[in-house]
Image (spheres, rainbow, N blue to C red):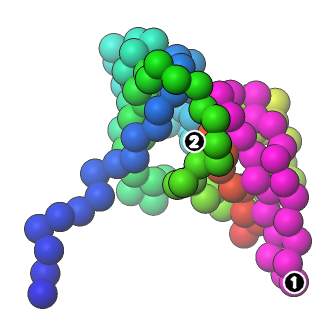
Amino acid sequence: MSSAVSVFGLSVDCGDAAAVASFWSAVLGRPVNLGATEQDAAIDATDPAKGPRLAFHKVPENKSVKNRLHLDLIAAEYDAERERVLRLGATVVNEVTAGSARWTTLADVEGNEFDLIAG
């Protein structure tokens, strides 16, 4: 059975949509859409290989618990990319090595977790 539904993008709740979109724009190398404000901002999927559209929406409450959904990013130049996203304002939450797998759980500028995977 086929479905007429597909994933359009992911939405991220935040305190300052333009600021969080700017962080993710720098991480992903994709421009923030025109018209970004503190209330709403987006980064379109300019290349499907670089991931889906990301939308950012201001909400009144602060983040208080672990994300139920997070992005997994993979990088061939893992150490260099890890250092780059840290310079952009990410913080380390956890480091994991499991057999040959290696990743870092990081938090963006508002504390939203994401994983950077060595690949």
Residue sitting at x 68%, y 28%: 109
* Helix, strand or loop status at disc 1: loop
Q: Mark 2 is on which residue type?
A: Leu
Of the two numbered discs 2 and 1 on the same chain, state the one appearing first in sequence.
2
Q: Position of residue 5 (x, y in %)?
A: 17, 64
* Mark drawn on residue 34: none
Q: Is residue 58 left or right of residue 16?
A: left
Q: Position of residue 52 (x, y in %)?
A: 40, 51
Which quadrant, please, contains the N terminus? Answer: bottom left
Residue sitting at x 83%, y 44%: 92
Magenta: main secondary structure: strand
Q: Is residue 5 magenta?
A: no
Which quadrant, please, contains the C terminus? Answer: bottom right
> Crowding near pointer 2: few (<14 within 10 Å), some, many (20+)?
some
Instruction: Mark yes or no: residue 46 visible.
Output: no
Q: Mark 1 is on which residue type?
A: Gly
Which residue is denoted by mark 1 in the rendering? 99
Quarter of the image where one finds residue 59: top left
Residue 115 vs 37, above or below: the answer is below
Residue 38 vs 63, above or below: the answer is above
> Crowding near pointer 1: few (<14 within 10 Å), some, many (20+)?
few
Question: Start and end of the magenta stretch?
Answer: 89-111
Q: Nearer the viewer, residue 85 or 3?
A: 3
Which residue is denoted by mark 2 in the rendering? 28
Q: Is residue 110 left or right of residue 3?
A: right
